[in-house]
Amino acid sequence: MSVAVRIIPCLDVKDGRVVKGVNFQGLRDAGDPVELARRYDAQGADEITFLDVSASSEGRATMLEVVSATAEQVFVPLTVGGGVRSADDVVRLLRAGADKVGINTAAIARPELLTEVAERFGNQVIVLSVDARRCPGGVSTPSGYEVTTHGGTRSTGIDAIEWAVRAAELGAGEILLNSMDADGVTGGFDLAMLDDVRRAVRVPLIASGGAGEPEHFAAAADHGADAVLAASVFHYGTMTIGQAKDALRAAGHPVR
């Protein structure tokens, strides 16, 4: 029997509020994270992802009190990321109620962090967040995609597919692939990028960036996504989680 495709609403949190923009710019308020998490849990979300979007750029840890309050309100797995720099940070997040921990910038700076966390807690705890974009002028990588950091504001010159492969080898249990070009645009996921990463890695792959219609979720699953993550379409009422699942089901994908 095929594994169900997961629908994951994402709560991008800044200063204690959920925010959303386009390509990580022009952020606007989308509500209270605890209230939104409760709503999505009731709607049938398979998991919820909480990202403290300014933690890395501001050089601080994730807001544990918001994580704890959110965890108390939901009964599905909660992934928390933003500002994770050490195994001790992972301990604090797990104690606050996280089931998985998203790691991005710190793993690029020190890849062995992935192995340290996997050996201590198991690779199922690690979701490697890859903020990837098509290489702009002046940047060249073998795949044509590069990794960015700090909410897409910094270029690394690192090949996104090579990094996903290496991270999985080091201990990442899942890859959250966020297309920075498509993020918040609502024109659909970057299916070519999904295809390329899917061919390269065997760990579960979460598609992120670009959801605008229910059919976009089915298309992402068609192109190898094990889970599909979205934010603004859920926050602003463009669609419900149930509608996204209906589209997956209609396309022949199993859902919970």
Image (tube, rainbow, N blue to C red):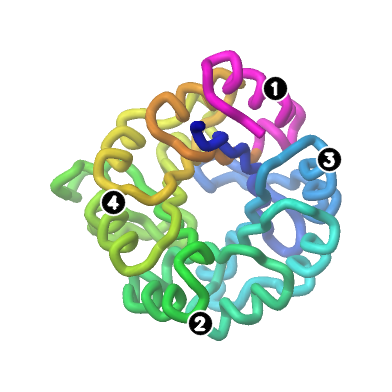
- What residue is disc 4 on? 160
**Is the residue under label 2 in contact with that under label 1 (CB below 8 Å)?**
no
In percent of width and height, residue 30 lies at 75, 44
**Which of the two discs, 4 and 2, labels the residue nearer the N terminus?**
2
In percent of width and height, residue 5 lies at 55, 35
Q: Secondary structure at mark 2?
A: helix
- What residue is disc 2 on? 87
Number of residues whose C-alpha sits closer than 10 Å to that of mark 1, classed few (under 14), some (14–19) or many (20 or more): some
- Name the image quarter holding the C terminus: top right
In depth, the one of 143 and 176 nearer the eye is 176
Marks 2 and 3, Cα distance to the nearest angstrom?
32 Å
Q: Which residue appears at 27% of the width and 58% of the height?
A: 163
Q: Which amino acid, by three-letter code, is at mark 1?
A: Gln
Q: Which amino acid, by three-letter code, is at mark 2?
A: Ala
Closer to the observer: label 4 or label 2?
Answer: 2
Q: Residue furthest front?
A: 1
Marks 4 and 2, Cα distance to the nearest angstrom?
24 Å
In depth, the one of 157 and 153 nearer the eye is 157
In percent of width and height, residue 24 lies at 53, 47
Q: Is residue 173 left or right of residue 76?
A: left
Residue 253 among those drawn in magenta: yes
- What residue is disc 1 on? 243
Quarter holding residue 64: bottom right
Quarter holding residue 14: bottom right
